[in-house]
Amino acid sequence: MVQFRTTIFMLAGLAIGSGLRAEERAIPNRPVVAGTLRLHVRERKETAPRSGNFQAVERDVEWKVSETAIIVCDMWEDHPCQMSAHRVDVMAPDMNRVVASARSLGVQIVHSPSSGVPFYEATFQRQRVKRAPVVKPPVPIEGWCYLDPSREAEYPIPYSTKVEDGCDDPVYLGDANTGRRQHAAIKIVGYDGVSDSGVEIYNFFEQIGIRNVVLMGVHTHYCVLGRSFGIRQMVRLGKNVVLCRDLTDAMYDPRKPPYVSHQRGTELAIEHIEKYWCPSIVSADLAKVVPGSDDPPAATGGK
């Protein structure tokens, strides 16, 4: 009987028919390439110590793509708050385009759908992060980083552990056990990583030399700030951190104080981060590098 060589197909990073599971195969990390992002950051500085008055300050920073990662936070396929799920549906295709552009420039992408990571256990992207050698962090990596009164004021919009309190559905239908896979519009491919563990992500970042971290996703003053891989933790670990402000959304109900639109509620959450934790950028900054910064090195010697 003629023996045919098994063809290896890749689907969402899973080796099908290869004879080896992802966790048994060699899994390379992304190539290190040249290129510099120029990010126009916005932060808010207090006009005088303890005055409580802040003004927006803008400046440019430059980050090497080889030292930069994007974390996609909790962009789930569904959510008990249907208005929140709807806004994720709207945001996800735009996020995928931005992530694809940044990936093509050489930026590392990490997908962090909390509680949904087991769905990706057999993929190369999941195993890539899990295999990173353990590194002792400079500070403890917390399971959740709560509001820090020593550093920040109270939230400008309500914060509650109950989804119902922040959900803007006209009638909340209850805490349904909705899907925790990442939204299908955001592709997990190539040299991407998958993890919802701050410890794993820190190990991975140290392995591949990541100094700069962009956070995007939901919800702005909940998971994006508080997760073990979120803004508070990454700042405490000494990373350069920015929030992508046009690819985030807050959990806020306009029927609650301060009685503003949902859009303005999200902006208030962003402003809180800009005051106390890190600057923000717009996603367009992640789609291009400084002209010439990604050129190959000039040849030396010979003709």
Image (spheres, rainbow, N blue to C red):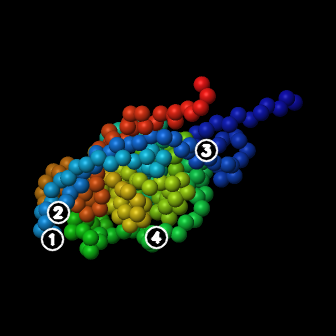
**Secondary structure category for the residue under label 1:** loop
Give the numbered dot on residue 205: none
Query: On the rendered image, what quadrant is the N terminus found in?
Result: top right
Whether residue 168 is visible, yes or no, is no
Residue type beneath disc 3: Leu
Residue sitting at x 33%, y 53%: 242
- The mark nearer the N terminus, 3 or 4, is 3
Is there a contact, CB below 8 Å, between mark 4 and mark 2?
no
Looking at the image, tell me whether mark 1 or mark 4 is earlier in sequence order.
1
Residue at 70% x, 40% y is 17
The answer to which image quadrant residue 162 occupies is bottom left
Which residue has dot 2 on it?
46
Residue under label 1, please give it.
50
Tag 4 residue: 138
Q: CA distance from mark 3 to mark 4?
A: 34 Å
Please say if 163 is above or below 71: below
Separation of marks 3 and 1 at Cα, in angstroms: 53 Å
Secondary structure under the numbered disc 3 in the rendered image: strand
Q: Are marks 2 and 1 in contact (CB under 8 Å)?
A: yes
Cα–Cα span, label 1 and label 4: 29 Å
At numbered mark 4, what does the secondary structure look like: helix, strand or loop? loop
Check the image and name the residue furthest to the right.
Answer: 1
Q: Does residue 303 appear anywhere in the picture?
A: yes
- In the image, taking residue 190 as reference, residue 91 lies left or right, namely left
Which amino acid type is marked by label 4? Answer: Pro
Where is residue 128? Give x, y as percent: 58, 52
Mark 3 or mark 1, whichever is nearer to me: 1
